[in-house]
Each structure stands twice: as structure tokens, then as C-alpha cells.
Image (spheres, rainbow, N blue to C red):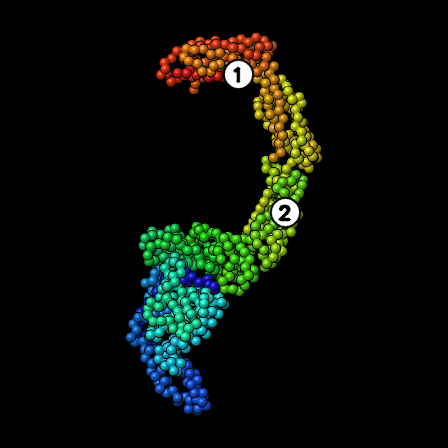
Amino acid sequence: MPLLPWRTDSDGFYFSNSWVFDPTEQTALAAAAATVAPAAVATVFAAAVGPALALDPALALDPTLPTLFPLLMTASSVVAAGVTATASLPGFGMCGGMAYTSLDYWHAKTPLPCGGNRSDQPTRPTQATLRDTIWKRLLDSLTGGGALQTTIAWSLTLNQLPSLFGGGGGTLLNWTRSEWLKIKASIDSGKPCPIGLIYATRDIWDQHQILVYGYDIISNGARLYVYDNNNPHSPGDSSFDPANDFLTFDLSGTVLKATSPGDSLGGTLAGFFATNYTPAAPPAGLDTSFGKFINWSSSAIDYMTAYGSILPIANATELSALGGILTDPRPAAGPVPPVFPHPRDNALLREHSAAPVFLYQGGAPFWVPDPTQLAKFGGWGAVRVVPDNTLAQFAGSPLNGTLIREVSSTSVFVCSYGALIPSPVPASDPDVRPVPDGAIVALLLDKVSLDYSAVLIGGQCAGRVSLKAPFSGADLTVTLACDQPFLATLNTTSVTIPKGTVVSNDFTVSSTGSVPASPSFKVTILATLGSATVSTTLEFDPPAITQFTLSPSTVNTGQSTTGTIVLVSPCPADLSISLLSYSSFATIPVSPVTIHKNTTQIQFTIDTPVVNAPFATMHVPILATCGKVNATAVLTVQPTVVAGVVKSITLFPSSVRPGGSTTATVTLQNAVNVPTVVGLASFAPNSTVFSGPSPLIASMPSQITMSAGQVQQQFTITTKVISPQATQRTAVIMAAAVTQVYAHLVLTT
């Protein structure tokens, strides 16, 4: 399925093939016809001689052979003279001129002055240059291109020459077979091909020329992708309409079987032929006021057309920056398309306030890194400068099935759901789209991997770079770097991935032995191929802490202890250990502490505060951290002032009827050698002891005294009688000695 990078909404005119000729132009057409008519008649005569000789081979020896067909010659000449008369044609098509001119602009990579809608034909004097160019190229197609002579000859053969002498559709079928090979060869070589169409029962001036830019082989024939200027596309319409964009033919019968966009105008397509197109340099700069900018009546903004993409222009200032003025935008017909297409293949675009140039293939952008590469795709003259902030919408992978290769490589890849798969399609295939060197290998770059995710400070590990798929075009050199060379070094600045393989030779990452000042011990290893970079991280761990001890591990308030940290092995650099106490009952005068290089331990002091009041014995965790290595020791801090510490208060029962009583039991954490006074109080839920006693409690002591050595004591709580409708039926009972504990008493209904 060769399909060249032509798109009718990008490279064809938006106006249709509908023109009015003045007398001068009609005269020029008649003169052209008169010039080529004799040669056309000679073609018909040659077509007739063959069948006559087949009927009577002895005629080949007859010296009077040229006089055998005087009536045929006379009749053909008369018919040729009649059909080439143009005086009665005030309106006519310039199909050949439109096909040739649009193809000229395609070859030149120059913006086509395409107009804005199907009725927007260029007129004199406003668009005289474009009008004259299309007219001139029409004459070129008819004369130098051979379209007029071939049309006359084929029409006479089809409609005037008797079948006995080789006339009729069978002869045109044979001629079409030969012409199809020329058309196919042109497409296969990457060149769109203008062709002439011959319809039965049509006048010569009603025959047609179109442009072929691709084909699909089908049984006994093909389907041609065509630009028919009788059926132009509107801006933003990149679709294929089977009725207007395809010519399908079958060569297996006695006459051509075909469907074409022109069938609706009457007549059956009897044959087609390639014209002798030669590119001509088109006039540049005509697009600015005739198609570069368009607008829709339903939209408040203007748009720019560029290689088939339709890009919004922010305001008049941006329009001016793009070279336009307020009167330049041409009116487009119909509503604004709901979705605008991506640029066509081989498009070169850059935003006017940005430097990067992007080549588009399969709808996706490929960055063109330098002028040398840009020259391979048409140079600066092929670049369209477009509105700012409009190209991001095209980011992504090429369409599935897109064939690409780097411009200097013969390795072809097919795009499949974002992945690139090596393809056996030859690099010379017209379906293969070139991209900048380095672009494919950048897309193939997969990952950089290391043998380990972490090693000890001072250690090392091996790594390698991988591709998603092999690149057979050449060995690939991948550049390597480390983001923190103070912490790690690489044994090489690059590695090689041999062509046809997916993995590079190994490289080595080595710790310098240094320790970072920041909490992170990670470095990033970067691998760069073309415009793509992948990375991975390597963590350098300090030696593990095998011991973290406190001596003594239990102290009274106001005393100190000594902490000792021991590493499993020496570190080649000074190692900072951060220390953290989880309570103010243990303070660390110096943090972090340093274990000097090539040693394994450090000692430090932990202080406790002087507290002249009783408190519950504290168990304080001390955390030592270095990177992700950590260890914990626990310091027990005891009070110097001895007092009982309440542990709990329980009620039995915990639910009583109003006016009833319950027994409360207070328990200390442990027995002490002095009496303990336990304060008692009640209060309502969702309040505090300072809010006053609970209204549900009739009586309870305000305190109890527990004797030395005693750990538990009971007392009685009596409740009040309350209304059955009362909603507040819970009291909180508190016991306090150094700390506070609570219980809940509920009055049932």
C-alpha cells in the first residue's frame, strides 16, 4: 500500500475546478488543440493499421498502404477539428493546471495558496499571479504533458474509430494496462503522478485530469488514492471519501471496469494515462493573503493552516507576528471542525517564539537537532512558523503501522502502540518515512540497570544499558553520567550497544568513599542516546550498626549515662550519626556525633534533668540514624522523690440504678515506703474536673490515703435519684496520684 506524504486537505486547493475563460484563453486552447490534432490522428491511424494487417497480412507488402485508409483519415481529421473547437465554451475546467500547480508546490515544499472554500477561486487582478500560474500549467499539461494529444487520440479511438479497425474500449483497456505500469512506477519512486481520464460519450473538453498519490493492489487491478480538484477537501478534513478520493479499476475484462470520482458527471471511465509532468518552480509568498490564514463565521478567532494542521491564532498581535494582517484570513465554509487533524507526513513546524523545529511522521513530532539534519528534509524554506502553544497537542507516538527509519540508516521500524518493532520492509519503500538521525535510537532507549540497588559506602557495582528492540543500522554509543561525581565515579563516559543487539557492554559505578552532607545517600546514573535519557539510582549505605548500648541503662533524674555505637565494619570516610531522644527526660548534648573514618565506634553522653517531684518511671527510646541505617537503645529514668503512682481505678458494678451505690478500687503501679494520698473527683462527660462535681453523685470521698507498702484500696460511691426522663446518666470518676486515671459510672433506667 504505497501512500505518499500527500494529503488533499494539506496539498490540494480548497477551491474547486470551476472557471470562466475569456476569448483570448479560448483561442489559446483552440490553437493548442490544432497543434496536437495531427499527431493524435496519426495515433488513431496507427491503431487502425494493426487490425487491418491482422485481417490481411499481404497488405504489409502493398506499396499503396498509405492510401488504404483515406476515408478513415479524413473522417478522423474532421472529427478532431470539430472537438477541438472552443468558441462555445465560456466556462471550463483547469483540472490539469490545478493538478500540476499543486504538485509544483508539493515538490518545492512551499506553502500552497489554497484559498478558503470551494467557491474561492483566484481572480484577476487580485490573485492574478496565481490565476495566471494555474492557466500556464494547464497549457503545460495539455501540450508538454501530452494530455491534450492523448485525450484526442483516445477519444477518437473510443468513440469514432470502428471496432473493425481497432476502435472501442478494448484498445483503451490495452493502453491503460501500459499506462498503469508508468503510474505505479512513479508512485513507487516517491512521486505523485498526474493522470488523464477518458470517459465514454463525453466531449474532449469534458475529459478530466487528476493526481494520484498512492495505491492499493486489489484483484486484477488497484485502488488509486487521488486528488480530484472537482471535489476539494475543506480545511481540517483529512478523511477519505470513497466517492471522491478513490479511483478503483479492474483490468481483467474486455473493457476497463472502473469507478471514479467523476462518474457522477456522466459517462463511464474507459481508460486513463500518465501525463508527462515536469516540476516547475511555483511563485512563493502567495499564501499569506490566500489560504495561510482562514476563519469561520461561527468562530471569533482566526486560524493558520500549515501542512494540513489548523492552528488557532491568539490575537491580532500574533497574526502580525506570523506575517499576516487583519484582511488576510479567507472565509472557510461550514462549521468549525470538532477535531483538527495532525500535520501530514514530512511536515516541518516550529512555534514563532521557540527555536526547536519538529518533523512530523505518522502524526507525531520528531525534533530536528541542527541545520545539517534540517537540510535533509527541505531546509528552512520548508519550515512553517506557527502560533505559540499550538504544537503540544500533537505530542505522542506515531500512528500504529507507521514505517520510519533514520535518514542515514536503512533500518526500518514499524510503530505499534508506542513501541518500535524492526520491520523487513526495505528502506526504499515509498511508505517508509525518514526521521532525523538519532530519533529512532532515542525512542528505542529502554533503561539503564544496575546489579544492585544499594552498596556500602566505598563499594561498587556493575551496570548496563538496554534497548527496547535491536537497531541493525550501526553500533550505538550511549553517553553515561553521574549527577553527584563527589559521591560516585564511572569507569567510562560511554558504552556501546553492538548493532543488532539490545544490551551494552558493562560499566562500573564506584563509591568515592565520601559521605553526603544531606540525608540522601542516593546518586543518579544517567544514560543518553540521541535526544533521550534514562536513569536509575544507586544508594550508598553506611556500615550497619551492630551495637547501640547505654551504660548504665537505668539512672535517677539528674544523672548521666554513656552511649556506645559500634559499626559492623569501618567506613572509608567520617560518618555522621544523628541522635534523637523521644523525651525531655533524656537530652543529648551533641548531635550528630562522628565516627571517624576507618574506625568502628563512638561514645557520647546522655543527660537527664533534675526533677524534685514524684513521677512515673520513664522509659526513653534513643534513636541513632545514618542514612537508612538505624538502631535504638532505651534509657530508664527513675524519680528521686518517692511517691505512689496511681495505675488504675475500677468500679463494681459500673452500672447502678439511680440512688444506688458502687465500690471503687484504686490500684498503684507499685508499693512505696511512704503513704500515698490519692485525690478523688467526679465530673460530667465532655467536661473537666474544674467544671465541678457530677450532678449524679450523692457522695464520695475527695481523697483516700494508702499506707506505706499498700498498693490497693476501696471506697464507696453513692448516686442520686434522678427522673426517668433524664438524658444525662453517666459520671466520670477520677483518681490522681502523680498521674490521673478514670472510670465511668452509668445510671440505668
- Asked if residue 119 shows in the view, the reply is yes
Mark 2, secondary structure of its residue:
strand
Q: Is residue 738 above or below residue 220?
A: above
Q: Nearer the viewer, residue 739 or 307?
A: 739
The amino acid pointed to by label 1 is Ser
Q: Is residue 443 above or below residue 609?
A: below
Q: CA distance from mark 1 to mark 2?
A: 61 Å
* Picture coordinates of residue 474, whole percent (x, y): 60, 58
Q: Residue at x 38, y 68 (%)?
A: 259
Give me the residue at 56% from left, 60% from top.
Answer: 411
Figure quadrant of the C terminus: top left
Residue name at image x 51 percent, y 13 percent:
665
Q: Amino acid at mark 2?
A: Gly
Q: Nearer the viewer, residue 672 or 371?
A: 672
Q: Return the disc, 1 or 2, that comes first in the chain's sequence.
A: 2
Task: Determine which quarter of the picture holds residue 682.
Answer: top left
- The answer to which of 477 and 202 lies nearer the viewer is 202
Q: Is residue 91 left or right of residue 469?
A: left
Where is residue 606 drawn, in percent x and y? 63, 23
Q: Report the side of 431 relative to 41 (left or right).
A: right
Q: Which residue is mark 1?
A: 648
Mark 1: few/some/many CA within 10 Å (<14, 14-19, 20+): some
- In percent of width and height, residue 649 lies at 51, 15
Which is more foreground, mark 1 or mark 2? 1
Provide residue 539's location: percent of width, then percent of height: 61, 40
Residue 568 in the figure: left or right of residue 416: right
Q: Which residue is mark 2?
A: 463
* Closer-to-camera residue (101/260): 260
SS for callout 1? strand
